[in-house]
Amino acid sequence: MTRRDVSFPCGTIVLEGILEIPDNVSFPAPAAVICHPHPLYGGNMRNNVTKAVSDGLLARGVICLRFNFRGTGRSQGEHDNGNSEVDDVRAALDFIHRLEEADPRRIVLAGYSFGCWVGLKAAADDPRPGRLVGIAPPVNEYDFSFLQRETRPKFLICGDRDFVCSPEKFQELVNAIPEPKMAVTIPGADHFHFGREKHIVEHTLQFLDRYPWETTA
């Protein structure tokens, strides 16, 4: 695996990221952009869940880009409550789309918590990600109604003890969005998923197996 510290522009600011490229794969290879949880509560690109998802996808031969939202780590700018952060996601997609080793036709957009909301919201108006992964969507706090128009394969996962993604509201969201979709609730898991990261990875890989790149349904 090759690991690079990278930076890329987003308007007038520069964001930092970690690009990891698996060994022994044919290029161009599938790629993923992974969005971290809320920066005002300690979230960054090195979060346990985002790191676990990256590791799992790398083992499957997927190039992974984790990045810090504006105002986090060495990323320039200031936190904007998820508004300008949508542009951060698009800038990360721009970076992957231009990457020589990455296949622009096989891009996964994955986000955890705040990163799930911002990432999927950015993808709603961006056709480049072909697969969408939403981990612990904070449905108690944010509006996810944009997913009701989402026709790409999508995967949502949460814990049944999540305090910002109640099982009832999670199921309401799952019921409201169209196929193709996959949804999983992890018994005993809360919002942070400490010690349960492997379950998220396993189900994410199952989702990608269910909806291989050759098909969209």
Image: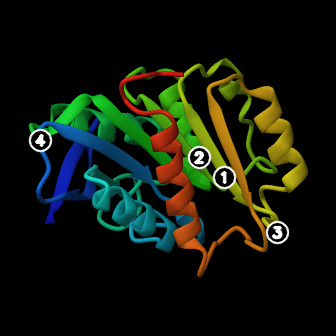
Sooner in the amino-acid sequence: mark 3 or mark 2: 2
Element at label 2:
strand
- Residue with the mark numbered 3: 161
- Residue under label 4: 101
In the image, residue 59 sits, relative to residue 139, either above or below, namely below
Residue type at mark 2 is Gly
| CB contact under 8 Å: marks 3 and 4 | no
Q: How far is the residue under mark 2 from the one under mark 4?
A: 25 Å
Rounded to the nearest whole Å, what is the CA distance between mark 3 and mark 4?
Answer: 39 Å
3 or 4: tag closer to the N-terminus: 4
Q: Which element type, helix, strand or loop, lies under badge 3? A: loop
**Residue at horizontal 44%, vertical 41%?**
109
* Circle 4 Cα neighbour tier, 10 Å, few/some/many (<14 / 14–19 / ≥20): some
Residue placed furthest toward the right: 168
User: Mark 4 belongs to which amino acid?
Assistant: Glu
Mark 1: secondary structure: strand
Label 1 neighbourhood size at 10 Å, few (<14), some (14-19), many (20+)? many
Q: Look at 66% across and 56% down and name the residue there.
A: 136
Q: In this view, does 153 lie above or below 80?
A: above
Crowding near the residue tagged with mark 2, few <14, some 14–19, many ≥20 C-alpha atoms within 10 Å: many
